[in-house]
Image: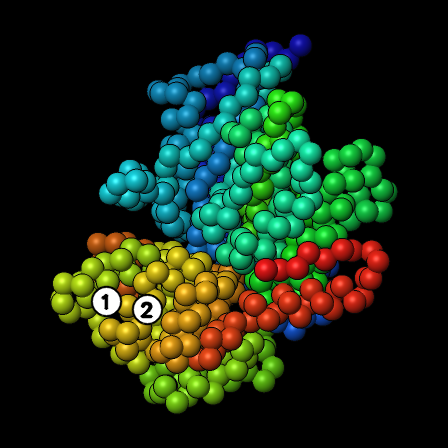
Amino acid sequence: MTPASTRTIKQEDLVQSVADALQYISYYHPVDYIKSLAAAYEREESPAAKDAMAQILINSRMCAEGHRPICQDTGIVTVFLEVGMDVRWEGFTGSLEDAVNEGVRRAYHHPDNKLRASVLADPAGKRTNTRDNTPAVINVKIVPGDKLDVIVAAKGGGSEAKSKFAMLNPSDSIVDWVLKTLPTMGAGWCPPGMLGIGIGGTAEKAMLLAKESLMEHIDIQELIERGPSNKVEELRLELYEKVNALGIGAQGLGGLTTVLDIKIKDYPTHAANLPVAMIPNCAATRHAHFTMDGSGPVSLEPPSLEDWPKLTYNPQNARRVDLDTITPADVLTFKPGEVLLLNGRMLTGRDAAHKRMVEMLDKGEPLPVDLKGRFIYYVGPVDPVRDEVVGPAGPTTATRMDKFTEQVLAQTGLLGMIGKAERGPTALETIKKHQSVYLMAVGGSAYLVSKAIKAAKVVGFADLGMEAIYEFEVKDMPVTVAVDAQGTSVHDTGPREWQARISKGMIGKIPVVEIA
C-alpha cells in the first residue's frame, strides 16, 4: 500500500498545478488535434477552407513558440476532478473549489502571458466582469483510490454558444436530429473541431456527458481502420461521415472537413425519453489531463515543435486595401470569397460597445468616434505583454451584432464590418440595402492576426475593458469577403457547392441532408 504521506495533496500544489495547466493549454493545442488538422489540411480541396486551416495551423505553431493564447477568447474554465477516497488534504484555507478558483485567478493574471477575463457575474443583470475569469465550472466525483485526477479545459464562448439539447422521442433518429441541427449552428463554433454528443440520463446529465466526451483523445481514424465494436462506435462513424458530407467545411466556408472526430458518451435513461445533447469543440480546442499523487505540483511536458507542419502564410492573388482611403465605390468591387489584405486604421467594437452606441444614437448623443466611411472589427483583444502593441486579437461571432447593424449603418455611415463566421438573414438584407460589406477573419488565428496590428489605442468606452472601442493600425491583415455589397454570402454558397461536390463523389454511400 502507498504510504499515507504520498496521498496528501497540499493546497498550494493544486493551485499551482491548475494555474500551470491553464497557461499550458492557452498556447499548446493537444498534439492529437494538430496532427488530425494537418492531415485534414492535406486532404482539403476547397481553397477557402484550406486557407483557413493554414492560418489556424500557423497560428498554433506561433503560439507554441511565443507562449501566447491560441485564441483571444481564453475561455470559461471547466474542471473535472476525480477524488480518490483515500486522498488527504493539507493546508487548505477554504474548499476544494476555492483552491481551483485560486489556480484560475493565478493563471489569468500571469504577467508574461495575460489571459482575457471573459466571465461576467450577474449574467441576467449588470453582467459585471469578475476580472480574473473566476469562478470556474467545477465537476467533482468521489472514486476509489488515493490520487486526484484532474482535467482542465477552457471553452470559448463561440463554441459554448452553439450547444444544443433536445428531448427526443425514443423512436426518433439521433442521426437525423444531428444532421438537421448542425447547419442551424452556423460557423461561430469555428470548425473544424469536434462534436461531443451525450445520450441518455436526464437533461442535465446529457449535457455533462457531451462536455465530458470532448475531453477524449481524437481517434476516429483508428476506429475507421479497425471497425466498430459496438453501437456507439457505429454511431460515431455514421455521424462522422454524414456530418462531413454536409460540406460546411473550415470556418463554414465550404469544404471536405467539418469535424475531425465525433465523441459520444451515453447513460441509462427513462423509458419515455431520449435526451440528446450536442456541444462543439472549436479550432482552438484546449484541455489538459494530469494526476496528483501528493508528490508536489504537476509539470506538463511541452510538445515538440516537430509535431506542427512547417507552413508559411502567403495568400496568392490577394488584394491590398487601404482603409484610410477606401470609398463606397471600392467596396462595390469586392467579390465574395476574395482574400483582402487590410492596411490602415480600423475601429473595434463588440456587443457591449454596440449596445451603448445605439443607446446614444437613440438619445441623439454624439458617439466617441466618427464611424462614417470606417470599418469596425468585432474583437475583444487580450491585453498586451512585453513588446506587444496588443495581445491576440481574433474575431468574435458576428451574428451577435446583427440586431444592431441596420441602425448603425443607417445612422453612422459605417462602411464595413469584420468578424467571425456568417451573418444572419436580416444582416444580409441590411448590408445589401446600404451597399456595405462584411469581411471574415479566421477564428482560431488570433495571434497571427495580432501580428498584423502595428498600433492600438482605446478611443471610446474605456470602462468596458476588452469590450472598449479601440483603434487598430494594421498592415496586411488577412480577411475574406464573406458578404459583398449585393448581400451574397460565401457561408451560403460555399457549403452548398461543397455539399453537392461531395454528394456527386459518393453516390450511394452518403445520403446528404439538404441545408435549408
Pointer 2 residue: 406
- If you read the primary sequence from the N terminus, does the residue marked by circle 2 or circle 1 appear first? 2
Asked whether residue 472 appears in the rendered view, the answer is no
In the rendered view, tell whether residue 102 sits above or below residue 246.
Answer: above
Q: Residue at x 65, y 73 (%)?
A: 47
Instruction: Give whichever of 323, 311 is nearer the camera.
Output: 323
User: Is the C terminus in the top left, top right, bottom left or bottom right quadrant?
Assistant: bottom right
Pointer 1 residue: 459
SS of the residue at dot 2?
helix
| Residue 425 % position (x, y) | 45, 65
In the rendered view, tell whether residue 76 sits above or below residue 97.
Answer: below
- Residue 387 falls in image quadrant: bottom left
SS of the residue at dot 1?
strand
In the rendered view, tell whether residue 209 sits above or below residue 353.
Answer: above
| Residue 359 % position (x, y) | 20, 59
Residue 33 as seen in the image, left or right of residue 463: right
